[in-house]
Image: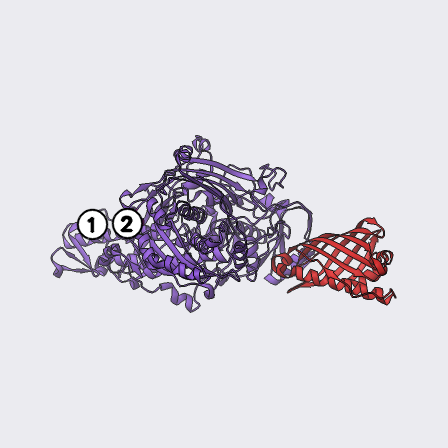
Amino acid sequence: MNIAVQHLFPASPGQLWGFLLDPKRLARCLPGCETLEEVAPDRYIAVMKIGVAAVKGTYTGRVEITEKQAPFHYKLSLEGSAAPGFVRGHAAMDLIEQDLGRTLLSMNAEAQAGGLIASVGQRFLSGIARQMVGQFFRNVEQELNRAGASAVPSPVERGFRE
Amino acid sequence: MHSDSGAGAQSARKWIGKSIPRHEDLRLLTGRGCFVDDIKLPNLHHAAILRSPHAHARIKRIDVSKALALDGVLAVLTGKEVRERTRPFSVVATSPLQYYCMAVEKARFVGEPVAAVVARDRSIGEDALDLIEVEYELLPAVVDPEKALEAGAPVLHDEVGSNLVCHRLLRYGDVDGAFERADLVLSERFVYPRYTSMPLETFAVIASYDHFDGMLTIWSNFMGPFIMHPITARALNIPENKLRFIVPSDIGGSFGIKTSIYPYLTLLALLAMQVRVPVKWIEDRREHLLASSSQTDRIGYREVAVSKEGTLLAIRSRLYDNVGAYLRTPEPATTFRPIGNAVGPYRVKNIEIDAHIVTTNKCPTGPNRAYGCQYIYFEQERLMDEIARKLNLDPAEVRLRNFIQPDEFPYTTPTGGIYDSGDYPRAFRMALGMIGYASFREEQKKARAEGQLLGLGIATGVDPSVSNMGYLTVALDPEVRQRHDYLPKSGAAETATIKMGPLGQVTVFLTTTPQGQGHETIISQIVAEELGISPDDVTVVDECDTAKNAWSISSGTYSSRFASVGAAAVAVATRSLREKLCRIAGHLLGVPAEEVEFQLGKFHPRGRPEKALRLSHVAGTAHWNPRGLPPGTDVGLQVMQTFSFPRAEPPDQKDRVNSSNTYGFMVDIAVVEVDRETGAVKILKYVSVHDSGTIINPKILEGQIYGGAFHGIAGALFEQLAYDDQGQMLSASLMDYKCPTAAEAPKIEIGHVVSPSPFTPLGSKGAGESSSETAPACIANAIADALSPLGVSVKELPLTPAKCWELMRSRSQAKETI
């Protein structure tokens, strides 16, 4: 499953970078995230509660950040499992500076699911992923607004494909 | 029911040929059937199985301590113990591949067992599975049989060294010469998907071990062939006479799938031997979809050489059969079962089959209704239509020009098949008449003018029944088969026991493990016919107990064998009982046995009905008065007889083999409409004409034909066991795996032609698979015809609405050379 998505944020690349790499603030924005604990530099253990159709589970996963080129690029790798199966994937994150102090975040992710989630929930997976990523971006945007970043026109989302 | 004059020969019979109601139905419809799940044993415990979520992964570590600590858990079994306590299952081909009942070191498909738990009840067992920790090292997976053979592809079995587990290049006749002479050569690549049978009852096993006398008893819904009995004994390292298989009287469908239950028999046996209490496992639907069995998926390249008159000169078939993660016996039987009928109903003399059997990270495959024939007819019948199109001939005419003619039977095919009887042109013309072929093209023209996509598809095929156990050894090189210590394989036998009590009533014992086919009814008709009694006077016990019944390694119900060999065994046993009765009656009446007439339950000397003796008098003599018997006659009235086909020989040095023993014929014709907007296919009319020799019970036969056709239609339009490219199964629920229901079931008009088989005592042939072999091709041809104004070609199944929609928007054309 390939997910390519872009979102315009009301913050400079530096501000957004600082936000996205702060586990505490990140944990508040990730849908279903119960804990996000830094176990080593750029390595985290996450516990997330996710439901895909009838297949609900609490996922324990490892998150790793590599290829850091602050504040423009990093790569996120994720591997999680729970009783209903596993998910794993990686995403290239690019922060592209725009006018009016805004930043376009471009995410290009490749994800794979296995076990019960794949065999029973496959039809819902891309929809759920789309919904979760959208929710995450909206949460980040709200947090940024709350932090007092300058007001910007409504965000643009586009480019999902599977 | 349409039938021709040939059926008239049956009218002299009183019970054979009658649609008497199925004896089994009362029991089944009132909930009194006996299935494995109905068996109650004291202190019964339950197994639950942990399965790999990964398609290809090394098992680094398994920690079962938390599971074992759970209250109610008796034992946990992992691959390590399986390897210590069993031998790998015997594999058909000369491949070093090792197959155990559980993943050993490596899991090779999603759903492969990696551990099993025995617990007080199933729910505790399932909870315990969650407590087992498995550490996997993920390996790259491959699911496409062609990609699996590319350099650098992940290799499933290191001991094999590649994913090619068996390869045979079989050549019959002068293929190259025929292609040189040809006026037209057509070639195409076809993709045939994986689908299954979805029996209502899933796999069910109970194992119990008596550690004092070493007797292992396994109850299951195993359906044969009983070659799996010695294979299981060997895997478990126990003497075969300490292994007892019991199959109850009722099995809720199988269609081939339950042949592949035997790894679970071994798994449950290991658990029962370990915990020393009986252990039961009933497969759930998700386990069934993920990890039971299915038909093999095939990529087939087919090339045909044709004369300008439309005569088929030669066939070249290069195929890649995807058997999944292991070569599980009886695979690669999919590839070799139809060897004898590889040319179908056509007279073509030259054929080449280049067979590649490939392992990939999918569930292992096995027998499924239409076993091996569906691919051949799909490819060949698609090309028959292409030949007609290229040569500007009528597709029906092209087939008529190629049929084997009625005066050519018994007909020996270039691959060694001996077709026993048939009249293909007559059956074919009957079907054309039923569908209204003469007026169809006019209707189609009108429909097209109105923008409708209307199409007609024809498919014909030879329906093989009763496999010759020897065909499987075509998988071996002829040099291997020539070694002095090689044990040749051949044969197709069934044994029946018939017993008459002192009052003249009959009990028949069989080990055919029926799965819903109505054997009890059919047997009662045959016995009633042969003895001149009523079917109600015949009790049939068709439960298999290998410790009590007469059985052979070919026992069971598979390969459409019952109406042919099962019926034959019952007929010959009944005839010998009748002879014995006449001998006794003759002795009592003071006349030679040949002069005894036996009618309506009475014996009398020919021409003197007033001197009649009742059946109970003659039968009673055998039981109560041995001194009244003719000298040299055994006391009692029990006859056990085996019927064995004499032409079921091992393959010869040129790989020719009579792979089955009776060969029916079928033609399916459908008219369909494809919705321009949605791609949905509607079957407007469907006819199916069959020749399966003498018909014993028309209602049961038509049930089989309807079921077979619908099974094939399901494969053509709906069903697919889908995987992603990493080997994750995408259709492991009945929401995702589309099984058609009554709502999708079309009306099917059935016609019969009767050409009795000269090789069976009753003239009957099997028909259990029948149109499941031809319906996929028939539907594909009808859709191709409907879409022909768009210039697209149909090469792949299933033709779901999405696929048809895509096809309507593509403009691909079959590759061709002239």
According to the rendering, which colour does chain A have?
Answer: red
The secondary element bearing badge 2 is classed as loop
Name the one closer to the observer, B265 or A75: A75
Q: Which residue is drawn at 83% across and 53% down?
A: A39
* Quadrant of residue A131 within the rendered picture: bottom right
Name the foreground residue: B520 vs B312: B312
Give chain B's shade. purple
As for residue B276 lying within the magenta part, the answer is: no
The image shows residue B74 at horizontal and vertical percentages of: 62, 56
* Residue at disc 1, secondary structure: loop
> Looking at this view, is B722 or B334 the one in front?
B722
Q: In this view, does B686 lie to the left or right of B95?
A: left
| Chain of the residue that carries numbered disc 2 in the rendered image | B
Mark 1 — residue? B630
Residue B761: give its label. 2
Residue B423 lies in the magenta-colored region: yes
* Pointer 1 and pointer 2 on the same chain: yes
Quadrant housing the N terminus of chain B? bottom left
Residue A159: horizontal and vertical position, in percent? 70, 58
**Which of the colour schemes (rainbow, by chain, secondary structure, one colour) is used?**
by chain
Q: Tag 2: residue type?
A: Pro
Res B160 seen here: yes
Q: Position of residue B797 (x, y in %)?
A: 50, 52
- The mark found on residue B665 in the picture is none
- Upstream in sequence: badge 1 or badge 2: 1
Range covered by the magenta-colored residues: B421-425
View extreme (right): residue: A148
Decide whether the magenta segment is chiefly helix, strand or loop.
loop
CB within 8 Å, label 1 to label 2: no
At horizontal 54% and vertical 48% (from top left) the residue drawn is B364
